[in-house]
Amino acid sequence: MGKLYPVGIQNFESLRRDGYFYVDKTAKIYELAKTGRYYFLSRPRRFGKSLMISTLEAYFQGKKELFEGLAIEGLEKEWKEYPILHLDLNARKYDSAESLDQELDKHLEQWEKIYGSDYSDRAPEERFYHIIRMAYEQTGERVVILVDEYDKPMLQTISNPDLQEQYRNTLKPFYGVMKSMDGYIKFALLTGVTKFGKVSVFSDLNNLMDLSRDLRYFDICGISEEELLRNFSDDIQELAAANGQTFEQACARLKEDYDGYHFCPDSPGMYNPFSILNTFAKKTYGSYWFETGTPTYLVELLKKSDYDLEEVSHVETDANILDSIFTDDNPIPVIYQSGYLTIKGYDKRFGIYTLGFPNREVEEGFMNFLLPFYANVNKTSSPFEIKKFVTDVESGDIDGFMERLQSFLADCPYELAKDIELHYQNVLFIVFCLAGLYTKVEYHTSRGRIDLVLQTDSYVYVMEFKLDGSAEQALQQIEDKQYALPFAKDSRKVYSIGVNFSSETRNIDKWIVK
């Protein structure tokens, strides 16, 4: 029997007792527990945060037997048991004023049963304060506090600012209790997707060490290339065999699809553990991570902020933005924190980060998801439309793919039509991203025109788009600026295509091919 892959298993104890495979992170966990006290870590969803919290829990419960054969076995001598308060905000839908209170109440009641407290009629933060005190007084040991998905209530209310404000007012004093209880606390870790709250939720709790972009802990969640090759070589071999590939080809495909998360400027890339384990379990490459949670709130933000999607593929930004909470006019912090963008480069001199898509799974997933929101296709037919578009492009059927572009642009939603040119640009960008498969499109855009070069194995298309000009003018511009010149000696067939958009019909009204 092969390996048991812990797909979706977030409990360390059950994972170890049932013989599931575990990528050994315990040396890092030991270091974390021994070198500091208050931590915060943000990572995208499905990246192993809950398992890490659960591993820390087992460690602080002193369950030595679960760690047999792991790195920490040779490091830890004491295996002491501490009282643990584990708050998991993941399991609930936060959509009403009561839902957060009920969730906190559920945890507080359980803890009050164990440690007793006469304060159960008070506000959540007061109850929390007294529970920590009672736990310490009864056990004689300081308390370990583990909070999983601390920001879930905030994320779910992005489109409801009033409810979000209410949740913030509940969570801020609640998390703030930890600051005032220093003498009672052994260790505290909060994890989540976003940094919601350098400003908001945590302003009372400014003593957290943020590990999110800390080079020492870049690999505390996820799978590094070294770990992949060390732990999964036979799995890669089986995957390759099942897909008619060599070992090297399978490695390259895994890297292209699932690697590329950089949480610090100079760190090696991390692989998405959820996608990797699913790929090995099913012996099929798929969009596993993307399909488990679709970023509807991101689309809301993108549309609200009139965002030029082409910029998503090479954003430049600084640390303040990466750490900030989102604002209506800048969706980038949340897109980055949610794992759809990652650090691609860093300019030390100016402190500027370059962001981009981590890998193919994320880029294609994101674009496929966006298409129906921007273009005139429904979710179900979207992949077929793109496939037909690609087939037309690859077979040189220009009228075919231009008509298809027309149909993508038809019935542009009114709220997007206020900046019609940006809307065209966004639709073209999504379509070419999905069809041009990543690297085959070069864009130049300026007010009133877009030019692009699209290359396939047999054809080169040099295209110029004008807004309210004429297709003839667009074609003339290709000639005048000699856009096709670089391909003069090319064995492929080169087409120049002049296209005109009309703001009146809100669509392409004419194209000319040469």
Image (cartoon, rainbow, N blue to C red):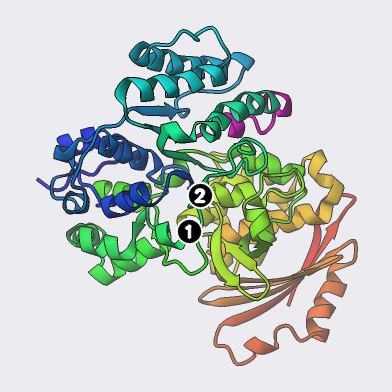
Q: Which residue in the rendered view is the most extreme toward the bottom?
A: 489
Q: Given the image, on which type of amino acid does mark 2 rest?
A: Met
Q: Given the image, on which type of amino acid does mark 1 rest?
A: Asp
Mark 1–mark 2 CB contact (< 8 Å): yes
Which of the image's four quarters has the N terminus? top left
Residue 477 shows in this picture:
yes
Foreground: disc 1 or disc 2:
2
Within 10 Å of the Cα at label 1, are there few (<14), some (14-19), or many (20+) other Cα atoms?
Answer: some
Instruction: Return the disc, 1 or 2, that comes first in the chain's sequence.
Output: 2
**Residue lying at 43% horizontally and 22% vertically, measured from the top left:** 133
Q: Which residue is mark 1?
A: 214
Magenta residues span 150-163
Badge 2 marks a residue whose secondary structure is: strand
Expressed as whole percent of the image width and height from the top left, the position of residue 462 reads: 69, 76
Q: Which residue is mark 2?
A: 209
Expressed as whole percent of the image width and height from the top left, the position of residue 4 reads: 18, 43
Expressed as whole percent of the image width and height from the top left, the position of residue 203 reads: 64, 39
**Residue lying at 64% horizontally and 90% vertically, measured from the top left:** 488
Left or right of 447? Residue 277 is left
Nearest to the observer: residue 13 or residue 159: 13
Left or right of 345? Residue 29 is left
Badge 1 marks a residue whose secondary structure is: loop
Q: CA distance from mark 1 to mark 2?
A: 10 Å
